[in-house]
Image (cartoon, rainbow, N blue to C red):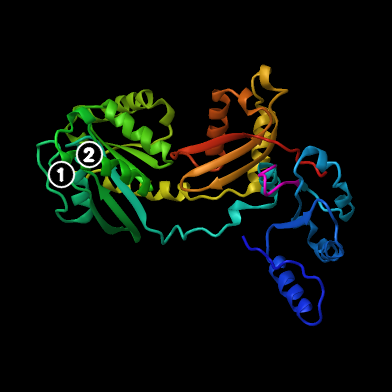
Amino acid sequence: MRKSASYPVRREGLDDLVIARTMALISKADLILFLVDAVDITPEDEEFAELLRPLSNRIVLVVNKADSPERDALVWGHMKWGFSPMAFISAEHNRNIEELVELMLPKLDFSAVASVDIERAEIRIAVMGKPNTGKSSLLNLLMGEEKSIVSEIPGTTRDIVEGTFTWKGRSMRVLDTAGIRRKKKVTDNVEYYSVTRSISVVTRADIIILMIDAQEGLTEQDKKIAAFAVQEGRGVIFALNKWDLMPDIKNSFEAAKDKLRWFFGQMAYAPVLPLSAKEGTGLDKLMNTIINMYGKLNKKIETPKLNKAVSEWIEATPPPIGTRNQFKLRYAVQVSTNPQKFIFFVTRPEAVAGAYVSFLKNRIREEFDLDSIPITLELKASRVGWKER
């Protein structure tokens, strides 16, 4: 965002230079907020409006000092310039600022924003799970050296061990946590410090590998770790470690996947992979899954394509009968990647059932190849119409 110089009252010499620089800056902008006073239209406003007319498709006319709905009715003289849309605001009193933002969004293509070079970026991995599930063994396998003390005694690795390595030309940074256990089992300050750091590292990671002992099965603590990771928008991979020790490996794996799908109902999209960190089996598939998932976490969706697709989904599969006439999509936008977050501006978001929101999230995954990762979808009330005023 850049603020141009105020349009000057003409004086000799300097004004033409200021105008030229201002127009050069404005011509590069994706969005132009033409800010005018609600009370008076000045000759300078008129002149500047003429200069901006060729850029009208990028302009939102912002009428400031519209302190009340009554004053809105007094400012329609600004319509003569033909700029649309218009926003009546009061910056001092924070009036109609949300409506202004909503008017700005259709003129911005978030997919065009420069992003990190995914092929060169360092992928940050957090290896998590309850104590003694093989986290340190996996780290040592990845790093090719002993980075953690491995013991049969749960909780012996107490610090986060961080290091980098390269896999098929991709740079990786791996975080080996000390394990998360219930607070009632934390008996000393060192272990408590470890739990706190282990949880905080989730916010630094791109992808969480949740290590689960295939022989011991799932725990409530596993569920808490996964839920926290998804809350933070991180990719999660369930790694069933020590799988080589299981009898009837093929059938046991399918049964374990079904159990995971049931246990983590809201994470049916997350990959489940067999692994033996001690023997190194399953490592290649795990690392390829990480690289693939990282690409999806950082994928950008073109705004026009998103809106076209969402409109088609809603038309083909409308909400339940009770809300059909209450729920209309105004605009959809992808507001962030890694984590992937979308906002749909709609009428009556409170009338939309959670099941329908889940349906929309699943369609996003299917249509834009975002399977295997968490998606946040927020429905916000549309405060203004999208038609030209």
Q: Is residue 258 above or below residue 136?
A: above
Query: Which of 143 and 192 lies nearest the eye of the viewer?
Result: 192
Q: Is residue 101 above or below residue 48?
A: above
- Whether residue 276 appears in this view of the structure is no
Q: Earlier in the sequence, mark 2 or mark 1?
A: 1
Quarter-of-image position of residue 120: bottom left
Q: What is the C-alpha distance between the residues marked 2 and 1?
A: 8 Å
Circle 2 residues within 10 Å: few <14, some 14–19, many ≥20:
many
Residue at the far top in the pictured view = 322
Provide residue 67's location: percent of width, then percent of height: 75, 43
Q: Is residue 176 above or below residue 9?
A: above
Q: Amino acid at mark 2?
A: Gly
- From the viewer's perspective, tell me whether residue 370 is left or right of residue 8: left
Element at label 1: loop
Q: Amino acid at mark 1?
A: Thr
Give the magenta-colored segment's residue range: 88-95
Quarter-of-image position of residue 200: top left
Q: Which mark is residue 337?
A: none
Query: Which of 375 and 315 lies nearest the eye of the viewer?
Result: 375
Query: Which of 116 and 60 lies nearest the eye of the viewer?
Result: 60
**What secondary structure prevails in the magenta region?**
loop
Q: Which residue is mark 2?
A: 179
Q: Residue 89 colored magenta?
A: yes
* Residue at 60 percent of width and 52 percent of height: 110
Q: Are marks 2 and 1 in contact (CB under 8 Å)?
A: yes
Q: Which residue is mark 1?
A: 157
* Residue at 63 percent of width and 28 percent of height: 349
